[in-house]
Amino acid sequence: MTASESGVPTLGGDEFRQQTPKEMIFFVHKLVEVESIDGKIHTGWVHTIDPVSKSIVLVQFSEDTSNECTVVMGHAVKTVRISSDATEHEDELERLFSRETKITFTKEEIQRRKIDLKDWLEKNRLPVTMSGDQEELLSVSDALFIQPPYTSDNCISTNEIILGRIQALIKLKPKT
């Protein structure tokens, strides 16, 4: 990651496409400017980044209720610059794309879910470690990461085979 003249972190397209899923999580919920190879600047809050294609889903919030969603295809990314580290729209981004009513968990419930899932994966002989700034991620051999609240929908991996198998295993986990 390099700094532009203004001291703001900027990634070139190739450097961005080489990011691992663990490194891409850093961009989620941040305000970024993405320059595409056609010279257009796309600005918005990052909802997600596809770990395989490296496509970025941006949301632009407006004063009225009409929000705009833009997908910048991974192959078209020339540069990515973080405009703001603030995550002020995190809850709003999650509500926009939620499929169902979001269940909120207490910190204790999240911690219990993490430990239960870690135990389940270890019982099935998978090497699991905790990673992330606050050890909030479960990591399976640095090939797959699981974010809170630790369901099969919260898995991130560039390897589709590993992703599918771990998600299937998580779905088989007995309810506790």
Image: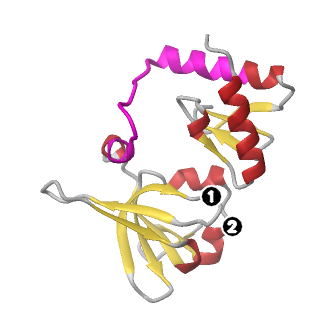
**Quarter holding residue 99:** top left
| Number of disc labels | 2
In this view, the mark in front (1 or 2):
1
| Position of the C terminus by quadrant | top right
Question: From the image, which quarter does the N terminus lie in?
Answer: bottom right
Residue at (46, 89) in percent of width and height:
38
Magenta segment, principal secondary structure? helix
Tell me residue 101's x, y (percent). Answer: 35, 31
Alpha carbon distance from label 1 to label 2: 10 Å
Residue at image location 65% in from the left, 76% down from the top = 14
In the picture shown, does residue 115 fall above or below 65? above
Q: Tell me where residue 146 appears, x and y as whole percent.
A: 63, 37
Q: Is 91 positioned to the left or the right of 113 in the image? A: left
Residue type, label 2: Gln
Among numbered discs 1 and 2, the one appearing first in the sequence: 2
Residue positioned most to the bottom: 38
Q: Which residues are magenta?
A: 93-118
Label 1 sits on residue: 51
For residue 125, which quarter of the picture? top right
As for residue 96 lying within the magenta part, the answer is yes
What is the residue that sits farthest to the right in this orientation?
125
**Is residue 167 shown above or below 113?**
below
